[in-house]
Image (cartoon, rainbow, N blue to C red):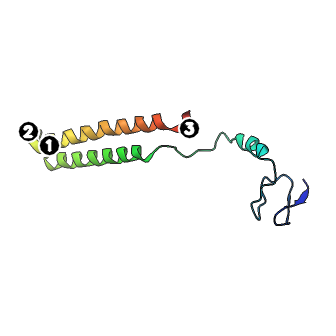
Amino acid sequence: MALIKCSECRKDISDKALVCPNCGNPIKDQNVAVQISAKKDPMQIDPVFVSKKWKLVKLVAWGSIIVGVILMLGGGFDFNKPIVNIGTGIAFFGLIELIVGKVGAWYEDRRAR
C-alpha cells in the first residue's frame, strides 16, 4: 500500500482508496468500485424495499383486529349480543387484511427479483 496525493485537496491518501476520505473525490475507476461493491457479505441485512401502501394496509389491519377484540370484550364474548358479532366480523376482516398485507409486501419486495 502506497500513499498518493489527492488531485483535489492534495492530501496523502491510500492508493487503494476508492474516494478521498477528506474531500470525497473519486480516486479509482468506477468499474473497480462496482466490482468491489458486488462482493457482499452474506450476513449483511439489506433494508426492506416495500412501498408504504403495504405498511398502511398492515397498520389498518392491526387497528381492525384491536377494535374487534375490544368490541368482543365489551360484549363479554356473548355471541347472542350483536356487538360481539360485529366485533368478531371486524376482527376477522382485520385478520384477512393482515394476511393480504403480508403477502402483498412479500410479493412486492424488490430484493427477491
**Where does residue 40 sit, x and y in percent of width and height?**
69, 41
Mark 2 touching mark 1, by CB under 8 A? yes
Taking the image as shown, residue 70 lies to the left or right of residue 61, namely left
Taking the image as shown, residue 96 lies to the left or right of residue 8, namely left
**Where does residue 25 sit, x and y in percent of width and height?**
77, 59
- Dot 2 or dot 3: first in sequence order is 2
- Place residue 14 in its image quadrant: bottom right
Mark 3 touching mark 1, by CB under 8 A? no
Category of crowding for the residue at label 1, using alpha-carbon neighbours closer than 10 angstroms: few (below 14), some (14–19), many (at least 20): many
Q: Give, as a three-letter code, the residue at label 3.
A: Arg
Q: Give, as a three-letter code, the residue at label 2.
A: Asn
Which disc, if any, is residue 112?
Answer: none
At 41% from the left and 36% from the top, the residue drawn is: 104
Which disc, if any, is residue 80?
Answer: 2
For the residues marked 3 and 1, what is the alpha-carbon distance in whole angstroms?
42 Å
- Dot 3 or dot 1: first in sequence order is 1
From the image, state whether disc 3 or disc 1 is nearer to you. 3
- Which secondary structure, mark 3? helix
Q: Give, as a three-letter code, the residue at label 1.
A: Val
**Where does residue 107 sit, x and y in percent of width and height?**
46, 34
Q: Residue 109 or 41: which is nearer the viewer? A: 109
Which disc, if any, is residue 84?
Answer: 1
Reading the image, the residue beneath label 3 is 111
- Which secondary structure, mark 1? helix
At 40% from the left and 38% from the top, the residue drawn is: 102
From the image, state whether disc 2 or disc 3 is nearer to you. 3
